[in-house]
Amino acid sequence: MPAIRPLPETLISQIAAGEVVDRPASVLKELLENSFDAGATEIGVALSEGGVRQIRVVDNGGGIPMDDLAMAFARHATSKIASLEDLEQVRSLGFRGEALASIASVARVSLASRASGAARAYAIKAEAGTIGAIEPAAQPDGTAVEVGDLYYNTPARRKFLKSEATEFAHCEEAFTRAVLSRPDVVFTLRHNGRMIARHGASDPAKRIEAALGGEFAQSMRAVEANGSALALSGFAGSPAYTRASRDAQFLYVNGRFVRDRLLAHALREAYRDVLHGERHPAYVLFLRIDPRSIDVNVHPAKTEIRFRDPRAVHQFVFHAVAKGLSGTAAEAPAAVATPVATGHSVLPRSSQAALGLAQPVAGYTAMFAERRTSPGSVADTVPDEAPPLGFALAQLHGIYILAQNRHGLVLVDMHAAHERILYEKLKSALDSRTMNTQKLLIPATFHADGLDVATAEEHGSTLNLLGFDVAAISPFALAVRAVPSMLADADVSGLARALLRDIREYGASRVLTERRDELLGTMACHGAVRANRALTIPEMNALLREMEETERSGQCNHGRPTWFQMSLADLDKLFMRGR
Ligand code: ADP
Ligand code: MG
């Protein structure tokens, strides 16, 4: 057994570096945090080869006095805290005094700084744990740090670095996190000499637009809540603006970007009712909390934190975000107004009266009553026992059914009527869990994106409940193998697509509950006879009989009437025929 010996200082740093500096992006993060801690208002970042070849961060912060320069590279040396008491209420981003030492153990670092008020700037180099001599340098107020050839002396680790593009993407993410956290700070980012991003001093909303794009900025809702011990501010993307990944979730605690489970959970809960499970919300939120009630010293990278009162924080964040998201009221009337005007989207069924349309339902009932009480003004042409909607005479332009009943002429919008019937049938079948399905002889296959395929696989039971059997036949294609019997004639793939879209957007549980009527409407619309389909007289009569049996058949799912009665008297008037 070899004797127990202390590890060499450089090796200690290299081991520590594994936790703090695992790739160029984490080096960049540490350097940016140092610039923030130094009070910089302008920060320039220049990278080459994804940051592997070089990372250079220049700031206009307070700088480092000449006497402290060498200490900057010493392990566990920091200017930010001096005691346990300081640690417990730390307000700076750094405090472990570890980053520069770690970086210097796995890369070539040079640092030039001019402390505010100092007459000159000085530079120092560190390489493989060896700190060079302090030399005069040309540098305006502030600090410039250059990190070159990351992992040049630890080839095993260097192998883990990914392509230049990947490493650059991670650096860009670290940059964006910093950019979003401080709208008041001016930033530039260059890669391989090219200017990638430039941000002037701004306000939070404009900074978000500049960093994350206009689409998100237009959808986002302000979140603002102030408690006695904590405050949350920022912006949360509307549920309509969702993303396939968590790439636009920016959460900061006292200015520090965190990936915290508790907070992430509070946010998921806040979005739960309004978001499909596979989509991810976007947000930029800042939690301010008394530093004494959190512990950021959980992990060297400090992206995790511990709250003294996690429940209170969870509650607070959940309510603040839910409230911010509920600021949708202003949009609702506009969203309804469009379908009313075009008459194509789903309307509340009761809105028909509001639209000033005729109300055939009332007329229908009246007609039944009249039929019973006063038999026969035109009894000679139509037998007394004739059904209320009479018998079909013809189809007009592939759109209307003309029928003759006891009162005169009945005009039926065939698609609207059929749709209504299917809707009611589907509804009662779903309610009684008796949706009859029909296996398709030849499955209908269609191209689908990855998310559609995932949705079909994940929500198979919901689809079954609705009478569908949809299976993935490749990562990009789905096959519909069974549909509800009453929709067997429909455009099956169009129907499956519409269904998946709804489940994707609203989540399976909402599709079956609060969105159920809309969904059934979609299914009915797809299944209903299309215009221009020639119907035979028996088919038309069958439709009329079904209408009579169907509740509320007087109006289609969109609230439009499905049929009109023109009495002989109405027709007489048209022809000015005094009778
Ligand atoms: P920490 O940030 O935890 O203190 P670092 O190793 O990152 O540890 O930095 C060590 C020290 O070097 C800091 O405490 C700070 O005094 C000084 N320093 C590093 N970067 C800068 C900078 N950009 N401007 C001013 N001082 C800096
Ligand atoms: Mg630091």
Image (cartoon, rainbow, N blue to C red):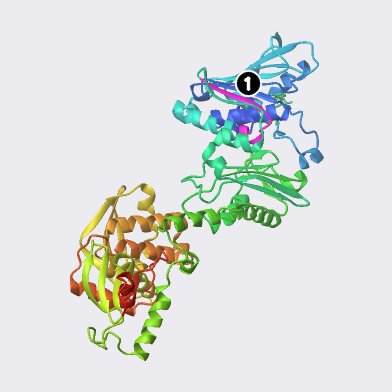
Callout 1: CB less than 8 Å from ligand 1: no
Give the residue number, with chain letter if any, for mark 1: 129
| Location of residue 177 with respect to 378 vertically, above or below | above
**Relative horizontal placement of residue 89, taking residue 495 as reference (left or right):** right
Looking at the picture, which amino acid does disc 1 mark? Answer: Gly
Q: How many marks?
A: 1
Q: Which residues are magenta?
A: 178-191
Q: In the rendered image, is residue 3 in sight?
A: no
Residue 385 location, x and y as percent? 26, 88
Residue 119 placement: quadrant: top right
Is residue 182 on the magenta stretch?
Answer: yes
Would you place residue 299 above or below residue 183 in this image? Answer: below
Q: Residue at x 59, y 56 (%)?
A: 329
Answer with left or right where residue 300 lies relative to residue 472. right
Please tell me which residue lies in front, 402 or 270: 402
Indicate whether 330 appears above or below 153. below
SS category of the residue bearing label 1: loop
**Res. 208 image quadrant:** top right
Specify the quadrant that holds the N terminus: top right
Residue 407, placed above or below residue 376: above
* Residue 66 in picture, x, y percent from top left: 76, 15
The x and y percentages for residue 29 are 61, 31
In front: 380, or 415? 380
